[in-house]
Image (cartoon, rainbow, N blue to C red):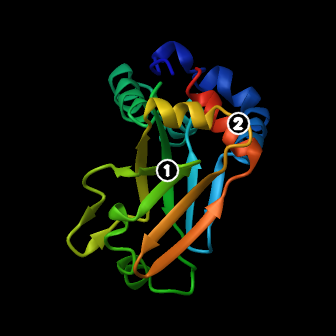
Amino acid sequence: MKQLVRADLLGPARYAPIREEYRRRVIALKKHRRVEVGERVSLVFENRDTLLFQLEEMLRAESITSDAAIQAELDVYDTLRPTAASLSATLFLEIPRNEDAKAALHRFIGIDEHVTLVIGEHSVRAQFEPGRQEGERISAVQYTRYPLTPAAITALGTPGTPVAVELDHPAYAMRVALSEESRASLARDLDD
């Protein structure tokens, strides 16, 4: 997937009139890219469209207009894009409103050692972005990357290959299979 650059952005004047249509399109796209792993964990596998949407929304919401600030955001989001040999996903730790967030998040300390993407016979342990868990503190939003071997890439690109996300954390163990549409959507990321 090619690098995100300034020319990819519409900017406020061109984005505002198409925002709702753009938003609907990305929501439809995410339907096959969002994985609910039980009630407390979800992942959204990122691609060029999801990242550009997030960038446009960030620039709009924060009224970011300076070239330096826009480039800084581009640089951050560019690190989240999949590559020819890896997938990336944003992992969300879902905390119900009626729970103490600090206590609920504490339960997930160490999750960075317990998330796996399973593609056929290939198990790919998630690599977590550093700094989002320190000691007894953990962020509800985590950024993960899944480096793939050539054999795993071939398996992901093969229709019918079973794909799943597995968590084997002592306090939260769960496995969820992805749909064939999800497998195909992720496989396309490696072709871009």
Nearer to us in this view, 80 or 120 = 120
Q: Which mark is residue 184?
A: 2
Q: Amino acid at mark 2?
A: Ala
**What's the distance in space between the residues labelled 2 and 1, CA to CA?**
19 Å
Q: Residue at x 51, y 61 (%)?
A: 92
Picture coordinates of residue 8, whole percent (x, y)? 55, 17
Q: Residue at x 43, y 65 (%)?
A: 140
In this picture, residue 121 sits left or right of residue 32: left
Q: Are marks 2 and 1 in contact (CB under 8 Å)?
A: no
**Residue lying at the far left of the rendered structure:** 135
Q: Is residue 137 above or below residue 7?
A: below
Q: Is residue 90 above or below residue 2?
A: below
Q: Is residue 64 above or below residue 122?
A: above
Q: Quadrant of residue 104?
A: bottom left
Which element type, helix, strand or loop, lies under badge 1? Answer: strand
Picture coordinates of residue 178, whole percent (x, y)? 68, 53
In this picture, residue 37 sits left or right of residue 169: right
